[in-house]
Image (cartoon, coloured by chain):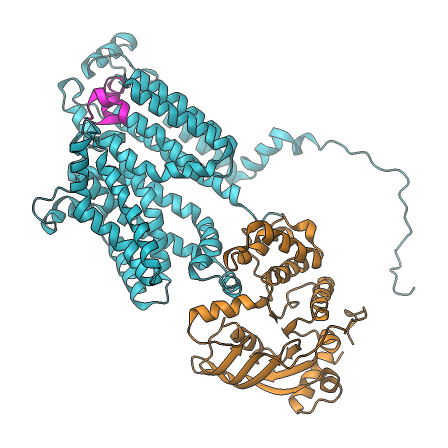
Chain colours: A orange, B cyan
Amino acid sequence: MSEDITRKIDRSHMQVSDEVAIDIRNMNKWYGNFHVLRDIDLTVHKGERIVIAGPSGSGKSTLIRCINRLEEHQSGHIVVDGIELTNDIKNIDKVRSEVGMVFQHFNLFPHLTVLENCTLAPIWVRKVPRKQAEATAMKYLEKVKIPDQAHKYPGQLSGGQQQRVAIARSLCMQPKIMLFDEPTSALDPEMIKEVLDTMIQLAEEGMTMICVTHEMGFAQAVANRVIFMDQGQIVEQNEPREFFNNPRSERTKLFLSQILGH
Amino acid sequence: MSETHAQTVPFVRDTMLPPADPPVREAGTVRWLRQNLFSGPLNTVLTVLGVLIVWFLVSHFWDWFAHSVWNAGSLAECRRIIAETWGEGARGACWAVIRERWNQYVFGFYPVELYWRPTMTFGLLFVALAPVLFSESAAIRRVVLGIATVLTLWLMVTLNAPALWLVFAAAVLIGALLISERRPAWLLVFSVLYPLMGVWFLWGGSAWGPAMVLVGPALGWLAWRLVGRVSGLLATVAALVVPLVWWTLFAGDAARDAESLVSLSIPAVASDRFGGFLLSITIGVSGIAMSLPLGIVLALARRSDMVLVKTLAVMFIEFIRGVPLIALLFVASLLLNYFLPPGTTFDIILRVIIMVTLFSAAYMAEVIRGGLAALPRGQYEAADALGLDYWKAQRLIVLPQALKISIPGIVSTFIGMFKDTTLVTFVGLYDPLKSMSDAVRASTSWKGIYWEPYIFVGFIFFLICFGMSRYSMYLERRLARDHR
């Protein structure tokens, strides 16, 4: 469906286990009086690749930002890797160090070099010795194919390169779960492919991933489950082939016809 | 082919053009003049007008500057020399007053035989500042420390400093030069100890006083380690309370006892002997050094989620900013005595330093808050998402960027504050501008001299403030990261 995904995907390590990675039950969130997330129930198993789609304002970004508590939920339960998210700051920091996040606008630290961006959290949060943190960082920078940029500042890189650094930065914390919040929406078309390739590579290695994205080609090729959200609710979820070929709700059909229409 | 324009003709270049010089009108000085000074009728008129104004000012003051007298014992003698040399009615500047009284403008009424002490303190200030201000450039540190070493030692010899102290100063300065090449971070130890050392050098007395002050943090650290095994929160409280208890209850007696056992005294100089630039720089440097950290804390507090902390910060900042500095200085000089237990002697300069610090910290907080607000929210979110706790996120991500944005505002606050140190004249201290000039004019020889002392003092203030401004520009350039 999308010309961005051309290579053959190696599915040998993409295995979904029975272990639960994230368990969200009856979760509600309000911004003031505005009910952004309504009765969300979602269980994510280890190794799942979930794509969340939906029109803007449907609450998909807010949902994944609740998983690492960038947003607070007001009722219900969110359990990540066995730890329930409450007001306990220690638990929140623990969850955050296990869950990597990639943002739409990269959010690299502009005053630090690429390498320093990648080693900062391992050194200060995980207390990894500097030498070792740098070795790990170089390993991941090689994985995202920009080891030669390690000593540049983020402002000197292209958008696609910056986003790959952001992915490497998250991976340096060796997270169990990766969240992607529209990682390609701010990129030029020719840079989208390099970022998607990196994400596919991660999926092939069996990473548990939740991606908010409009890249339906990526969803079809990589996801094992697609979730469609509208007005703060999960409207439909299914495995990708069924979701795209045989959408059940009218809202989903309308959405798909709009984004795949031409 | 129907979409091709009918006029399209195939073209191939067969000879390449060599580069040519631009026409005379479009190059060099002529072009610059045309573009910048005479680009249109209005600009031409303004240029001519500007030149005329400059000419008027220069021609008006030129005689006065040209007829400068440097050697004279009094204003009357100055006038006589001017009249003799350039004729009756000629006007001229009498810089002889600076030549004769420069020491008062620099040191106030500090004992002449001890001038070497403030001089050494000022020289060592550069050792304390170099690793902080020029942490990334060994070359600049080398130049700064080299100049400081040569000048300090030369001046100390000229001012008859005792041999022991000359050796001490030489050891520190040359040691710093060497350490700066290999391990500049070690110099920060000196930067931390410098304030206490400086206080001792300037005011003199027993070295046990500052030493016992230093014991406070050491005890606090010990308490933190011991209590830390029980509870983290209690440890923090203990680390804060133990030094305070030590300072208020025990440090004074301990210093006295130690002094009676082993005397480590140099002649004491009382605060009312301080004056001139010695006073301004003492207050200015202390105020600058303390108001930046305090301002950062206030700015963070004002953005805090904790209502009480935020309210206190807002009240403090708005109160201080709403009150003139002079009012605070009067509070320092008069009212504080009412609140302190009778018999406490609380040094007037120290009180003024506290007030000046609080005053500029309030402005500083607002400047830094601007920098904090200018950071994109994504930076906070990225720091959170990586699991950095509040203090680590502030220290490693937020503050380095926010402070960088705020550099021009921070330095403006510093400059403003340094110039405001002249206001201490209102609480009876000898600032260089007003009190010191008044003191000079009080002698019969220099009665009636106004312009020259003010120009001299203004010039020194300008040099220092301009230096700060240039430093801030250097820092901005050094920290620039967003160029491609």
Task: Identify the image quadrant of the N terminus of chain A.
Answer: bottom right
Residue at image coords 40%, 26%: B173
Magenta segment includes B107? yes
Residue at image coords 31%, 46%: B218
Residue A42 visible in the picture: yes
Q: Nearer the viewer, residue B287 or B125?
A: B125
Task: Identify the image quadrant of the C terminus of chain A.
Answer: bottom right
Stretch in magenta = B97-117
Q: Quadrant of residue B272?
A: top left
Q: Is residue A136 above or below residue B478?
A: below
Q: Nearer the viewer, residue B211 or A86?
A: B211
Q: Nearer the viewer, residue A212 or B41?
A: A212
Q: Quadrant of residue A44?
A: bottom right
Residue at image coords 57%, 32%: B33
Residue B451 visible in the picture: no
Please give left or right for residue B236 compared with residue A104 in the image: left
Q: Is residue A51 above or below residue B247?
A: below
Q: Is residue B457 above or below residue A104?
A: above
Rendered location of residue B447, percent (x, y): 16, 22
Q: Main secondary structure of the magenta part?
A: helix
Rendered location of residue B12, percent (x, y): 90, 46
Q: Is residue B291 above or below residue B298?
A: above
Magenta segment includes B329? no
Please give left or right for residue A9 compared with residue A33 in the image: right
Please give left or right for residue B75 compared with residue B3 in the image: left
